[in-house]
Image (cartoon, rainbow, N blue to C red):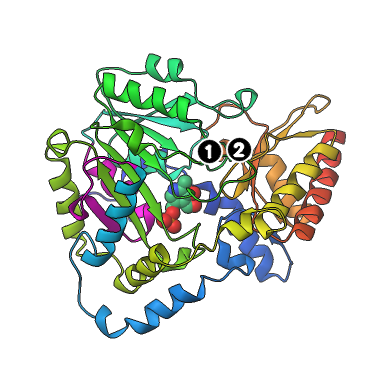
C-alpha cells in the first residue's frame, strides 16, 4: 500500500492543459473577490456578454418540461435526429440517417467520446496548430498522440495539405479540422477542404470536423461543409447550440457520421455504446435544439454589417490597424480574433507574462497564444462577444501594457 497521504491522479493529466479556464482565470476570480472590476475576454460564452438564447429555444424547453422526465435513446430524441440527418443530407453528406446522429451534452462530450471510441495507445491524431485545446486534451487523455499540422499566421492560418500529408505515419488514425477555426477565425476554402478530404481518403483516416461555428462567417467568407466533399469516406461532423444559437449553458451538441456505413465498421457501434454508458444527453436541451434547427435564422443579423458581432470584429480590426505593435489576420468566421505582437524592441517577450501583466495592471483577461498549442509566443486570443466600445477600451489597455512591457 502506498504511504502517500495524497491521492495520486492519472499521470497523463500532467500533459493536459486547458488555459482558457486555467491559472489566469483563477487569478482573475481572486481579483474579483477582492473587488477589482475586470474585462474578461477569455471564454466564448455568449451569455456572459448579455446575449440570450433565442426566444423560441427558451419556449421549446418550457413546452416540453413534462416530456423531459425520462431518459431518451442514448443517441438522442428520434425527432431531433431526423431533422439533423435531413439537414446534413441536404448539404450533400452521404449515407446519413437518424441512426448516424449522436446527441451529446455539448460538442465537448462528443469530442471526448469520439476519440475514446477510436484510439488505441500510441495512435496519432493530426490536429491543427493553433487548435481548440480540448482536441489536444481529449487525444492525450484517450491515450493518443497529438501531431500538429501548421496553420501559420503568415499563411492566413490556412493548413498546407502537403505538410499534412507529410506528417502521416502508420499510426495516424484521424485528421481533425476546425472550420471556421477557433482561435484564428480562419475559414477554409472548398479547394483546401477537398485536398484534405482526398488525403484522408488516400490514407484511410477518419475525418473529424468541428463545425460548431458553421453559420458564423463575416463579409464574403463562405463556410463549406466538409462531409459532402468526403463522399463515401467516413467523416464525423460536430455542431451544436452553444455558439450559433448562443445557448452554451444548455449543453447540446451533435455529431453526424457520414460516408458509406460499411466503411465505418464497428465505429458506429462504439459510439452508440459509449453513448449508452452515459445513458443520454440532456433532454430539455434537445427540445431546444429541435426548435433551433426548425426555427428562424437568428445569427445572420449579428454577423452582417451593423450586427453586434460584425461591429465588434470591426473594432478589433481597426484597433490592430491603428497599432504599431499588433498585426491581425482578420477573422473570417467564429467568435475570436488572434492578434500577433511585433516584439522587436522588447528585451524578451513571453505571452503568459504579458497576459499576467495585462490582467494585474489593466484588469483585462485574455488567453495567451501558446494555450492553443502554437510554437510561437507572440499571439493572444480575445472573443468578439463584448460590445464594440468595450473592445476599443480593451485594446487601449493592451497598448498601455505593451508600452510598459517594452520599457521593462
Ligand atoms: N469546439 C470548438 C471549436 C469550440 O470553440 C468549443 C467551445 O468553445 C467547443 C467545441 C465546445 O462546445 P460545447 O459548448 O458544445 O461543448
- Answer whether residue 102 is magenta in the image: yes
Tell me the CA gap for discs 2 and 1: 6 Å
192 displayed left or right of 38: left
The correct choice, above or below, for 360 with respect to 148 in the image is below
Q: Position of residue 307 (x, y in %)?
A: 68, 59
Q: Nearer the viewer, residue 282 or 402?
A: 282
Asked whether the residues under the numbered discs 2 and 1 touch, taking CB atoms below 8 Å apart as contact, a structural biologist would say yes
Q: Residue at x 56, y 55 (%)?
A: 44
Q: Is residue 4 visible?
A: no
The correct choice, above or below, for 222 with respect to 126 in the image is below
Q: Which residue is mark 2?
A: 369
The correct choice, above or below, for 281 with respect to 146 in the image is below
Res 289 quadrant in image: bottom left
- The tally of labels here is 2
- Give the magenta part as a residue range: 92-118
Q: Residues within 10 Å of mark 1 (few under 14, many from 20)?
A: many
Q: Position of residue 297 (x, y in %)?
A: 51, 62
Q: Nearer the viewer, residue 294 or 135?
A: 294
Q: Residues within 10 Å of mark 2 (few under 14, many from 20)?
A: many
Q: Residue at x 53, y 34 (%)?
A: 130
- Answer whether residue 289 is magenta in the image: no
Res 35 quadrant in image: bottom right
Q: Residue at x 51, y 41 (%)?
A: 180
Q: Which residue is mark 1?
A: 372
Q: Position of residue 374 (x, y in %)?
A: 55, 31
Amino acid at each position: 500500500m502506498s504511504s502517500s497521504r495524497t491521492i495520486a491522479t492519472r499521470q497523463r493529466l500532467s500533459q493536459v492543459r486547458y488555459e482558457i479556464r486555467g491559472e489566469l482565470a483563477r487569478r482573475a476570480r481572486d481579483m474579483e473577490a477582492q473587488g477589482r472590476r475586470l474585462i474578461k475576454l477569455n471564454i466564448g460564452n455568449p451569455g456572459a456578454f448579455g446575449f440570450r438564447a433565442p426566444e423560441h429555444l427558451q419556449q421549446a424547453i418550457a413546452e416540453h418540461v413534462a416530456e423531459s422526465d425520462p431518459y431518451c435513446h442514448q443517441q438522442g430524441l428520434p425527432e431531433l435526429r431526423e431533422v439533423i440527418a435531413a439537414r446534413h443530407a441536404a448539404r450533400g453528406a452521404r449515407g446519413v440517417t437518424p441512426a448516424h446522429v449522436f446527441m451529446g451534452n455539448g460538442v465537448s462530450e462528443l469530442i471526448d467520446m469520439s476519440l475514446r471510441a477510436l484510439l488505441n495507445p500510441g495512435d496519432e491524431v493530426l490536429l491543427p496548430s493553433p487548435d481548440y485545446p480540448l482536441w489536444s486534451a481529449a487525444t492525450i487523455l484517450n491515450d493518443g498522440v497529438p501531431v500538429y499540422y501548421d496553420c501559420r499566421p503568415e499563411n492566413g492560418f490556412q493548413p498546407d495539405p502537403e505538410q499534412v500529408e507529410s506528417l502521416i505515419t502508420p499510426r495516424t488514425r484521424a485528421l481533425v479540422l476546425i472550420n471556421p477555426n477557433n482561435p484564428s477565425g480562419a475559414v477554409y476554402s472548398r479547394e483546401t477542404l477537398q485536398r484534405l478530404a482526398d488525403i484522408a481518403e488516400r490514407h484511410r483516416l477518419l475525418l473529424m470536423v468541428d463545425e460548431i461555428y458553421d453559420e458564423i462567417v463575416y463579409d464574403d467568407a463562405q463556410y463549406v461543409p466538409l462531409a459532402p466533399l468526403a463522399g463515401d469516406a467516413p467523416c464525423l461532423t460536430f455542431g451544436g447550440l452553444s455558439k450559433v444559437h448562443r445557448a452554451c449553458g444548455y449543453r447540446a451538441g451533435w455529431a453526424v457520421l457520414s460516408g458509406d456505413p460499411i466503411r465505418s465498421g464497428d465505429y458506429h457501434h462504439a459510439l452508440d455504446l459509449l453513448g449508452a454508458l452515459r445513458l443520454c444527453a440532456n433532454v430539455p436541451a434537445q427540445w431546444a435544439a429541435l426548435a433551433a434547427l426548425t426555427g428562424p435564422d437568428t445569427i445572420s443579423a449579428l454577423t452582417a454589417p451593423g450586427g453586434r458581432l460584425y461591429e465588434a470584429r470591426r473594432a478589433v480590426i481597426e484597433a490592430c490597424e491603428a497599432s504599431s505593435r499588433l498585426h491581425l489576420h482578420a477573422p473570417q468566421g467564429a467568435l475570436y480574433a488572434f492578434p500577433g505582437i511585433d516584439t522587436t524592441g522588447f528585451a524578451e517577450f513571453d505571452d503568459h507574462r504579458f497576459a499576467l501583466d495585462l490582467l494585474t495592471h489593466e484588469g483585462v483577461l485574455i488567453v495567451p497564444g501558446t494555450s492553443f498549442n502554437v510554437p510561437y509566443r507572440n499571439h493572444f486570443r480575445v472573443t468578439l462577444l463584448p460590445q464594440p466600445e468595450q473592445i476599443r477600451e480593451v485594446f487601449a489597455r493592451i497598448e498601455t501594457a505593451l508600452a510598459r512591457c517594452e520599457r521593462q
